[in-house]
Image (spheres, helix red, strand yellow):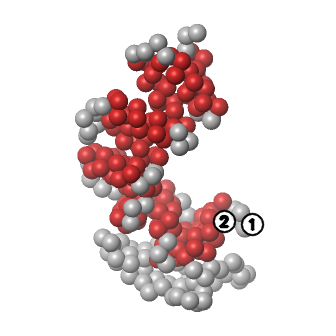
Amino acid sequence: MEVAVAVAVAVGRSRLRVAALFTLWAGIGSCALSPTATASPRPACEDGKECLALATRYLIGEGVSPDPRRATELYELACVAGEIEGCVRLGRLLHEGRGVEQSLRRAVALFKSACHADHGEGCERLATMYLLGEGVQRDGAFAGLLYRRACDAGEPAGCQHLANMYLRGEAVPRDRERAAELYLQVCDQGLITSCTALAFLYEVSQASPLDLLRARLLYQRACTGGDPRACERLVQLPE
């Protein structure tokens, strides 16, 4: 792993306490945990999986009062305990500055570590940061490689981003057929916006008499799935 974890994690039945002080990654800094205990007890977690689940409860307010900062602390504990999903969710919050001071540099490091572990979303989010130049030097070619890695790891958003790059010829050779294949792949996986993108390709291409019908069916599918753009395109299609 490029960024080494600089903390010893308790094993067995030892309880992970949010009041514990540690540094998350050497050379990156930490999302410091508050050393001040609260007056009333709060749910604690014993291992990485429990911390991950508890963090999500605090983030969305499931059975507890919503507390993004508490969620951040627990995601950090989960990450340090070896739960890659915890690292990715902590990276999201650092990227957004939600519950913690925004740090694009730390978010990049977290996503990079997750991607090295073949976590699809970690690769996809890292790719987008390289594509936009957020916390790193902008590098479209590297972003394309990361999107491909995310797609291969089963992350639908990675496949869609890669399809967009093929469609535009951005940092990869322009290839509408490959773009269409990727849109279809993730449309079938339930990524509705890819259904809309594929429908638009059929609409503007009309290489076959059936293309307009294919476009209509895909727009209907995406519209039913909640994409307002698909609904707009659907009413504009000729009968």
Q: Residue, x 53% and y 74% (percent of image)?
A: 78
Residue 150 against residue 44 in the figure, above or below: above
Amino acid type shown at disc 2: Arg
Nearest to the observer: residue 143 or residue 204:
204
Residue 137 visible to the viewer: yes
Quarter occupied by residue 233 = top right
Say whether residue 85 is left or right of residue 127: right
Does the residue at mark 2 contact the one at mark 1 (Cβ under 8 Å)? yes
Amino acid type shown at disc 1: Gly
SS for tag 1?
Answer: loop
Q: Residue, x 44% and y 36% (percent of image)?
A: 183
Q: How many marks?
A: 2
Q: Name the residue under label 1.
A: 63
- Mark sitting on residue 190: none
Q: Name the residue under label 2.
A: 57
Residue 228 visible to the viewer: no
Nearest to the observer: residue 219 or residue 44:
219
